[in-house]
Image (cartoon, rainbow, N blue to C red):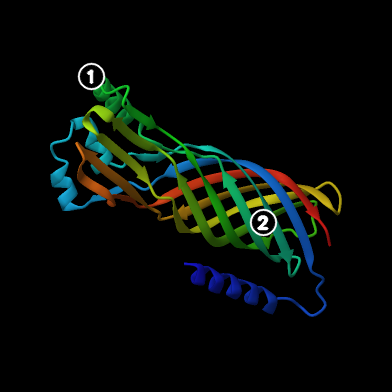
Amino acid sequence: MKKVLRAVLFLAVAAALVAVPAQAQMKLDFSLFGGYGFNMSFASTVTTTSAFSSGTAGYWDAWQPFFHDPVLELKAGPSFGGRVTLWFTPMIGFEGSFEYSLAKPRFNEVNVADLEAQMDDIGYTSYFTITPEGGHLMKFYGNIIFNLMPSAQFSPYLTAGIGSTSYTIEPAINITHSGYSELMNLSYDNASALTFNGGAGFNYWFSPMIGLRVDARMFFASPKFLQNYDYKIFGSVDWPTDNYVTQSGSHMDAVITVGLVIRVM
């Protein structure tokens, strides 16, 4: 994926440079922003190895969604980051962005409640711990910017680009019961996915050097989340740590950001 990103970014810069007239004066903008992301859809396809599916068929009903259903979800949340924009012409620029999102991956709340009730019913509350949510997202992306009114105080633009989203996945389940020498751990690997984005926004210039920037974008990725599961009781290893369950599919979110833009040249 890194090779693909490098190739796309190289072609984007090359295309922009071709469009630069010899007399053009480049401009450079820096912007810092805060925003909020609204999760539109999340990976919802679950695959389970046949051996694992049959081997866990006798587990309590409350466990089954964690092996067969898309229990991982994503909360909406705030984000912050920065952008560097190099304008090759008054109308065409290339931009690199970094965004850190506090939107937290979580387990489905209904499934968590059912499992907690089941563990309480069989007297496992003191041996059972669950981390229902936790983690974050980081996005790195490069975009082409098309300025629609480059010389105006109110300067709208369109943008499209490609990058990568890194998912830190912290929801987890653990059981430790010394009386039965019982140990169980369920967690997810962190993941990354190629990400496309597109949107629009505007700069409102208070002066030739300082302005307000408002930006709205849609992001699309296809992540794959691998579940780690291991279980043993009375010293017998029923399931060694491995990725028996995978949750994958499309992740789409809308992000609105507001920030300060500074023109340094």
Position of the C terminus, as image quadrant, is bottom right
Which mark identifies residue 232?
none
The mark nearer the N terminus, 2 or 1, is 1
Judged from the image, the secondary structure of the residue bearing numbered disc 2 is strand
| Closer to the camera in the image, 197 or 184 | 184
Q: Nearer the viewer, mark 2 or mark 1?
A: 1
Using a 10 Å C-alpha cutoff, classify the residue at mark 1 as few (fewer than 14 neighbours), some (14 to 19) or many (20 or more). Answer: few
- Give how far across and how far down residue 234 sits, in percent: 19, 36
The amino acid pointed to by label 2 is: Tyr
Q: In which quadrant of the rendered view does residue 129 lie?
A: top left
Report the residue marked by disc 2: 157
Which residue is located at x 51 percent, y 58 percent?
164
Left/right placement of residue 187 relative to residue 24 reads left
The amino acid pointed to by label 1 is: Asp
Left/right placement of residue 89 relative to residue 78 reads right
| Closer to the camera in the image, 29 or 213 | 29
Which residue is located at x 59 percent, y 47 percent?
100
- Give how far across and how far down residue 245 sits, in percent: 27, 49
Above-or-below relation of 194 to 13 = above
Which residue is located at x 57 percent, y 60 percent?
160
- Give how far across and how far down residue 251 sits, in percent: 42, 49
Using a 10 Å C-alpha cutoff, classify the residue at mark 2 as few (fewer than 14 neighbours), some (14 to 19) or many (20 or more). Answer: some
- Give how far across and how far down residue 176 sits, in percent: 31, 32
Which mark identifies residue 121?
1
Above-or-below relation of 67 to 16 = above
Judged from the image, the secondary structure of the residue bearing numbered disc 1 is helix
State the count of labels. Answer: 2
| Closer to the camera in the image, 69 or 187 | 187
Q: In which quadrant of the rendered view does residue 158 lie?
A: bottom right
The answer for how far apart the CA atoms under marks 2 and 1 are is 58 Å
| Closer to the camera in the image, 162 or 201 | 162
